[in-house]
Amino acid sequence: MIDFLKNRKVQIAAQAVVITGLVGGTGAVVTMNKPVTLDVNGQSEEVRTFGGTVGDVLDSRDLDIEKRDQIKPGVNKKISRDMTITVNTAKELSLSVDGKKSDEVTHANTVGQALADLGVDAKGADLSAKPNQKLKDEGNDIDVTTAKDLTIVADGKDHKVSAAAGTAKEALAETKLKLDKDDFMSVPLSSKVSDGQVLTVNRVKNDTVKEKQAIKPKTETKKSDSLYVGETKVEDEGKEGQKQVSYKVKTVNGDEVKKEKKSEKVLSEPKTKVVIQGTKKKEAPAEKPDDSSSGSDAGTGDNGSGGSDDGDKSTGGGDSGSSSGNMSTQEIKDMLGGPGSKWYSVVECESNFDPKASNGTHFGLFQFLPQTWHSMGGSGNPSDASPQEQFQRAKKLQAQEGWGQWQCA
């Protein structure tokens, strides 16, 4: 086009005879010279062009256009008078939103426009650059800390925070809350926070607590033949002592999480409990002669007829004696089930198979207390009853109260 204009000027100077034609030609040139507005990255200027397309205009301005640049309308669009051509070049930027980094490309011209195009809510946010700052084609670094609504729970209360806080420490700084030396938050202070997050301030206390505690007395056992084997008696109940124990107690929000013993001091010594344990063995009753021996003896001392009668009486007396307690030791053992039977073991330990056994308070094969004997339907003294009746009452007692009635069980 420039060459064309130069040629036209030469012709005007050399051929004055064609002035009318030249004037007509000049009118055509003016008609082809169109005014347009060129906006490049927000900078506008009015230019006049002889070009036929948007691309021609851009070429005439010596603009370095890349494929990723944004041009409106397109480069092939025909030029019309007063047209506006907009060019927004592609710009590279490093974006960090609440610590999350990314590399982006935008056609925006300012920081604020770029954030809006990239969908970043900058309202109330903390920005590393002003929103109206112009972007360069490259080397743009933008750090954004978005506004967040958080809740900090402390001392039983909720503290609302609405601020552009990036970390727990920054969120805490938006309140009047303070952390004492041992206090801590539910997340590290350097932790990133997010919208809607709930943080907790944990209050820590380390106190020294003193407690009074009982000291259990020791038990001393003394042997004595004043009591039968298996019998015991408390000679001295003893007495508990007392001590003061100091603890270091750690609590978090009022709840005990650690208790460490530091020291203790005896305030009063305990008094030993003394128990007498019997060593006296129960003597086995002498075995009586059987009925046949008695009958023989009775017959020896009287006439035949009398002996016979006496023998019958003796036998009868044996039966009567059996019902009133005159059973042999072997018969009693057999009645109890013999060795291996629990009843056998109990009677062996309690009375050594003596139905008349007594220590002054307990009586008979099973060492009944009189009141217990009577509660089981017995009358009189248990040791006066037959072994069979004593066994009957013992079985009744065991069925109602269990084996715990006998220490030997």
Image: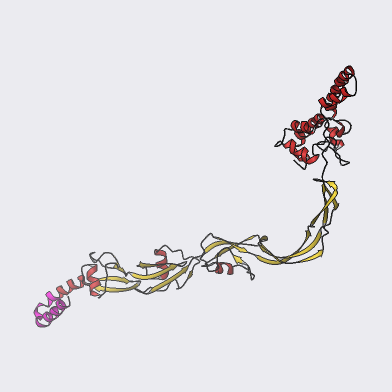
In the rendered image, the vertical position of residue 231 relative to residue 195, given as above or below? above
In the rendered image, the vertical position of residue 228 relative to residue 61, given as above or below? above
- Residue 368 rendering spot, x and y as whole percentages: 83, 37
Q: Quadrant of residue 6?
A: bottom left
Residue nearer the viewer, 109 or 217? 217
- Residue 298 rendering spot, x and y as whole percentages: 88, 24
Q: Main secondary structure of the magenta part?
A: helix
- Residue 355 rendering spot, x and y as whole percentages: 83, 34
Please count the marks in the image: 0
Q: Is residue 314 visible?
A: yes
Q: Is residue 395 visible?
A: no
In the rendered image, the vertical position of residue 372 relative to residue 31, given as above or below? above
- Residue 213 rendering spot, x and y as whole percentages: 77, 60
| Residue range of the region highlighted in magenta in the rendering | 1-22
In the rendered image, the vertical position of residue 114 relative to residue 380, given as above or below? below
Q: Is residue 82 magenta?
A: no
